[in-house]
Every structure is written in structure tokens, then in C-alpha cells.
Image: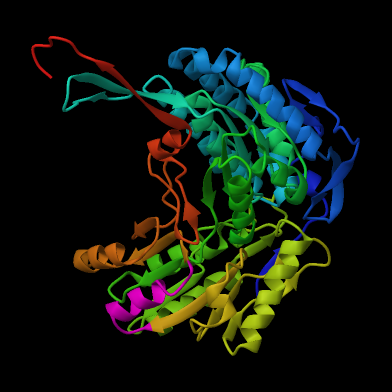
Amino acid sequence: MGSHCDIDDSSASFVKNPTIKFTKLFINGEFIDSISGKTFETIDPRTTETIARIAEGDKKDVDLAVKAARQAFDHGPWPRLPGSERARIMMKFADLIDENVEELASLDTIDAGKLYSMGKAVDIPQASCTLRYYAGAADKIHGQVLKMSREFHGYTLLEPIGVVGHIIPWNFPMGMFLLKISPALAAGCTMVVKPAEQTPLSALYCAHLAKLAGIPDGVLNVVTGFGPTAGAAISSHMDIDAVSFTGSPEVGRKVMQAAAASNLKVVSLELGGKSPLIIFDDVDVDMAAELAIFGILYNKGEICVASSRVYVQEGIYDELVKKLVEKAKAWVVGNPFDPKVQHGPQVDKKQFEKILSYIEHGKREGATLLTGGKPLGGKGYFIEPTIFSEVKEEMLIAQDEIFGPVMALAKFKTIEEAIERANSTRYGLAAGILTKDINVANTVSRSIRAGTIWINCYFAFDNDCPFGGYKMSGFGRDHGLEALHKYLQVKSVVTPLYNTPWL
């Protein structure tokens, strides 16, 4: 039968498309046109039709936004407020996000093809929780008293790093926006955010809510536009002190080169993954199948930690593969406003074509296509859930991040083989281990070179749990207090002691 596609033209029967209220750049507390007057289209991936025209910011607009952020940092109240006062405003901002959850969720649905029900119930509530988590940290930023070995009194101050540039991806527009700005706001920084050109709508709406919450003008600026112009201008700007980027290794390299060639700004990068899920044959097969299918099809595979390589021990391989194929065929692809749908369209034409080209590579290189592999429906960027077996490590579908609903399955015998195959990638973002044996779990979790290891669970994110990569998945951490410290400088202060009774 293959995956079925419920692509209903009457999306109004579920949720009314939101009215687009904000399409301009947000600089120094105002919505303004780009200096050039240029705009670009943002496209609905369900229909391939234009949703709205958005102001196209470039270098001159970034200069204007940085100037506002610099003024707000050097002379404005935000870095000088008590942490408790920053926290109060951030809490109000979080409340406003919760109050507007339906509109924000619907913006991400029409812009990114994301499930409306998931956005409303999970993504956006979690994003406002991230804001509250860092609000709670804003008044707990402490240095240390140093035990000096000579007659000096020494201590450290943690000071906000300054003006920050955030360049964010399109797969979780609201979640990534708040994941980046929240720790920087708590630290007392000011910032310029460039949302992905595919998904600018919710970021602009959030800028409006930030102003309503009382975040001072110039603290949070949003410049919509393209990577090679606006993104490059942020990375190379002489007056930005730090840049945070989530996206591909190719662009991450450019961000780092631009940072080095300009003012050696601090860089943090999260550059995707090719995460292995290792399933040992002592596990419950139904649980394993459920986690494995969710691990690759959640958010239509457009997630950097997707379990895109699944290694199954030979004892349960045949039984598990049968269940995976059944689940993939029953997976409902269609209009993301429909509560029955599990999987909307890929974000845009470029991503849609890239995924289909990787599926062709998989067939050409000799992997076995078990299910899926084709576009769905007459219009929109829908792709069937796709599973390949007999995948070898040298194949492109085992090496490259596809960022789509494509699983690469392979069989293994021993723990050593599983570890070796899991590590045979240039990425190191996440991994999953399914086993009932604690010794196996401990050995494998310590042997895989990745930033997050999930044992008997998957996608177990938490605000308190640092997230980031090894190897070509980048460096620096989001989530946790590690993320807050990315936006703080350590200053050592030393003063002599005279006639002190002790050191």
C-alpha cells in the first residue's frame, strides 16, 4: 500500500491560516523596511505558494542593527539591570509567547511545514520554558574568590560578552530562536538575529512580543535575509563580539573563517549529525521499532539528531525490520494542520530535491529500498517515509546528513563492531543505545564520540542538559548553564594585601 498522503486542500477545515502581521526588519525597537527596499518571498511548502513578501536585509541593514545593539550594550539599561529585573522581563516575554501559542504555531506550520498540533503542544511551550529557565539563571551569575598563593586578593567577575550575532536554522524556527536568545538575554548581552530565509515569520512575531514584554529598544534586533549577504555580514562584522550558528558544516566553516578574518569574535557552531541508533538483541522489539521510527520521522527527518543510521544486532534484525517497514507504511503524511497527520511537507523545494537525490544515490550504490522513496501528492514538498537496508559505511546515505525521512539500516554481530560502525562518521552530535544490559550501555556510551548519548530513549532534550557536538558537528553547547557561559567573559581582578593575618 505505501504511505498514504492526506493532502487536503481545504486546510481551513482544520485551522484558519494566520494573518501575517510582521514582514519588516526589527531594528532598535521598530519594524522598518530594508535600506535597499528589496523583499523576498516566503513560501508555503504545503502548496508551493507565496505566503508573504519579507524585507530583505543585507550588509547595510546589519550595520544599522549592530549600531543599535552596540548603543544598547554600551549605554543602555539592559546589561546594567539587576539580574532579577532582567528575569522579570524575560518571564513576561515567556508569558506572552504562551498567550500567543496558537498564532506562533500556525506561523511555523505554514512557513516550515511543521505539525500544528506538535507546535502548539510541545515545540512552543518548550521554547517558552527555555526562556524561563535562563530567566531563572539571570540573577545567579557569580564569579569566584581566588585563593592566591602570594599577598594578593583575587576574584573573577562574569561580564556579558557584548553584542552577539545569532544565525538560526529553519527546522525549529521558534525553538531555535529562543534557544539562542534566552541565555544571551540572561547574560545581559544585546543581539542581532538572522532567522533562516525559509522561516522568518515567527521570529518577527517574537520580536514584537519582546517589545511588549519590556525588553529595551536595541537589545533584540531581527534582520531577515539570506546567508551569503545578511549572514555573512554578521559573521564578519567588526563590532559583533560573538556569533552563534546552527546549520551545515559548509556554512559553519564560512562563519568561522569570517570571524577569524574580522575581529576574532568568539564562535559557537552546531553543525548537524549522522546519529547512530544501536539496538542490541536483548531489547523489547516493539519499543525499539517505535523509538527507531520516531527517531527518523519526527519533524519529517528535519532534525540534526535524527537517528538516520540504525544498527540492529543480528538476533532480532529480521523481526525488527519487518516492524519498521509496517510502521513506515502506516505513517500518515499530509496537511500539517490535520491532527491525524504525523508528517508534513519538507521545508522547501531545495530540501525536497536534495532528499530525493540522496534516495537515488542509495539505490544506485546498491542499498535495498524496503519502502518509500517517492514524492507524495500532486503539489507541495511531501516525501514518503523511506527505509534502506544493506547499507554499507562508504555509501553516501550512510555518510551525509540527508535531513529528511530516510533511514539507513545495517546489521551487526558484536559490541566492538557496533562501536566501530557508530564512530565511522565525520559527525558526532548524538547517538542512541537500546539494551537491557547496563554494562553494554556503559561501555558503548563511553566509546561513542558524540555530544549526547541517549540510553533506552531518544530526543530526550532538557533545558538543563547541555547539547552540542564532537568532531564536525561543531563546538560550544546550547541548553544548560554551559550555554549561558558562552555569552559571559571571565575577568580576573587582583589587588595587593598588606599586613594580612592570612592569605
Q: Position of residue 309 (x, y in %)?
A: 48, 72
Q: Residue furthest bottom?
A: 366
In this rendering, position of residue 176 left or right of residue 346: left
Q: Residue at x 86, y 45 (%)?
A: 40
**Is residue 18 in view from this perspective?**
no
411 vs 57, left or right, is left
Magenta region includes residue 417 = yes
Q: Point out the residue furthest to the right here.
A: 37
Q: Is residue 3 above or below residue 46?
A: below
Is residue 331 shown left or right of residue 49? left
Residue 288 in sight in this render: yes
- Which image quadrant for residue 386? bottom right
Residue at 44% over, 24% down: 159
160 to the left or right of 438: right
Give the magenta range: 412-426
x, y percent for residue 416: 29, 79
- Name the quarter where the C terminus is drawn: top left
Is 191 or 267 nearer to us in this picture?
A: 267
Front one among 401 and 99: 401
Kindly give the residue lying farthest to the left in the view shown.
Answer: 501
Q: x%, y% of residue 188?
A: 51, 23
